[in-house]
Every structure is written in structure tokens, then in C-alpha cells.
Image (cartoon, rainbow, N blue to C red):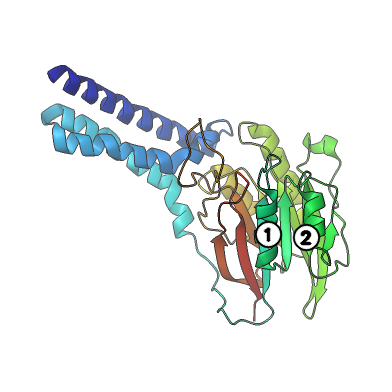
Amino acid sequence: MRSLRLLTTSLMVLTALGCALWVLTAQGGRWSVQLDILTHFAPMLLALSLLPAIYGLVFERGGARLLLVGVSAVTIAASGLLVAPEYLRPASPPAPDGAPCQIKLIQFNAWERNGRQAETIRWLRAQDPDILVVEEASIIAPALKRAFRGYHVSCGDCSVMILSKARPVARDVPVPPAAAYDDPPPIAGATFRDSRGEFSVFGTHYTWPIHSRWQQAQGRVISGLLNRFPKERLILTGDFNSTPWSFSRRREDAMFGLERRTRALFSWPADRSVAGLGLPFALLPIDHVYAGPGWRTVRAERGPRLGSDHYPVIVTLAPSP
């Protein structure tokens, strides 16, 4: 029994020290894009660090308790420094449910290995979105076009596509030459005209954060693209493979000059298991929707599990008064 207790205490100490080392190193993401990869797991580290803290308070005394609780407190504080700004950042006033001229936008990474396409498309069609932005759309595109007959399709043969009830007045995506940025992300775009004038919608799909410099270059492509359009009513959405507590995401939030309307909306993973284990909840908020000050948010919510490894994101916007 004593050996088991010693083993458990040792594991708790290693857990506490490992979490503390990870999250303190992640603070270097302020200056290093490689270290910034570590920031994405801040909420998980915060939750994991509670185990040694509780164990120390309940089962240990003296120095062991101080070590476990003290090191865990460092992890909790450092993780909080990363996560808290997402929950504390200011937001524009919301629009009421009955606000006029609303648009319903669904952003969804359909996943190229989606094994439940029919169910996925039935749900998407039942939502009756005004604008649907789909990433990893190559495989599901033919079925989507059949189901959304009557919608207008932008970049229909691309890995990112936009389907819309309204006919676009333009579908141009003026991206700088790829050589200037290594390799731009997939992008689809469409410009619409309503009673208040024109507004543009763009969808994109970043590479994984392990390709940190490439992902940074993709962010510069998107920022350069957005700067070519009036931002008052501009909308940007997609799978950014980047969480709100990363320093890269914060820098891009500032670069884009748009308000991110999704706040800590956990969207990955959905159906796909991680390391062979099925998860009952999502771990990372990596799908985002941005909009200019000419829009107010009615609601931003997550859809159900479908056949993808991502949850769909549903954002309803109304024009600002």
C-alpha cells in the first residue's frame, strides 16, 4: 500500500511539473511561432493541473502538499493568462432576435473522409442557410450542388466553396502571387449586393500549426486580401487550425481589422477519435467567423455532430443600425 501511495505521488509530481514546464514554455509564443504551438493546449493543461492540486490537498501533508499545490497553482495562473483574454475581450452590442435583414451563415469543414455525407447534407439543407461556406469540399461537392439546387456556387471545383441564396455580383479573389508567400491557403470569395450596398464573404482553410511559418504566411495572404476590400461589411470565415489563446490568432485578429464573432466555440474534434479514444467533447476552437462593424451578431452557435471531424459553426448577423 505504501509503495502504491509513493508511486501515485510520484506520478502526480511529474504531472504537475510537466504541465508547469509546458505552459511556461508556451509563454514564449509571444516571440516564437514554434513555441506558440504549445499555447493551443492551455485549457487542457489547466484542467489537468487540477488533478495533482486536488491530490495534494486531500492525500498529502507537509512538503509534498506544498510542492503539488504550488506547482499546480503556477500552471493554473499561466494557463489563465493565455485563456482569459478570449473570454474578457470586448464585443460589439448584439442584435435582437427580431432584427431585420438577418443573414444566416454556416461555416463547416466537411472533411474529405466524411462517411455520413447524406446525413450531413440533410442537416445542412434543413438549416436553410443564406450562405454556406464549406472546407474540404472536394468529395462532398457534387452531392452538395444537387441538394442545394437553386443556390449559387462560388469556386465550385475548389477545396473551399461558397453556396448562397443570393446571386453574387462578383467572385474574384485577388490574391498576391504564391511565390511571395510560399503557398497561399485555399480561398473562395463572393461579393453580394443588398439594399445597403455591397458586401464580400471569404472562406479559407489554413494548414496545421505544426507548419508554423507556413501558417503565418497564410495569415499574411488573408490580411493582404482583406485590405483590398471595404471592411465595414466584410465577412471572413473558415477552418483556421488556430485557437483563440494562441498569440498568432491574437495577432491576426488585430491584422484583419474585423471582429471575431465566435468566442471560444470549441469545434474539433467531433466524430473522429483522438489516439483511438472517442471523445464526448471538443478540445479546440479552431473554426472562426469574422465580420466588420457593419454587422451585429444575433447569435453564434455550434451545430451537432455530423460525419466530419469538425462541428459546423452557425452565425446569424444583422446589419448595424
146, above or below 116, in the image? below
Q: Secondary structure at mark 1?
A: helix
- At x 51%, y 51%, the residue is 266
Which tag, 1 or 2, sits closer to the chain's start? 1
Q: Is residue 237 visible?
A: no
Kind of residue at badge 1: Arg
Judging depth in this view, the residue of 58 and 112 nearest the camera is: 112
Name the residue that disc number 1 marks.
122
Q: Secondary structure at mark 2?
A: helix
- At x 63%, y 49%, the residue is 252
Q: Is residue 219 visible?
A: yes
Image-based side of 56 in relation to 73, left or right: left
Image-based side of 1 in relation to 223, left or right: left
Mark 1 touching mark 2, by CB under 8 A? yes
Q: Position of residue 191 (x, y in %)?
A: 82, 65
Q: How many numbered discs sit on the rendered protein? A: 2
Q: Residues within 10 Å of mark 1 (few under 14, many from 20)?
A: few
Q: Quadrant of residue 73?
A: top left
Image-based side of 45 in relation to 66, left or right: right
Name the residue that disc number 2 marks.
147
Disc 1 from disc 2: Cα separation:
8 Å
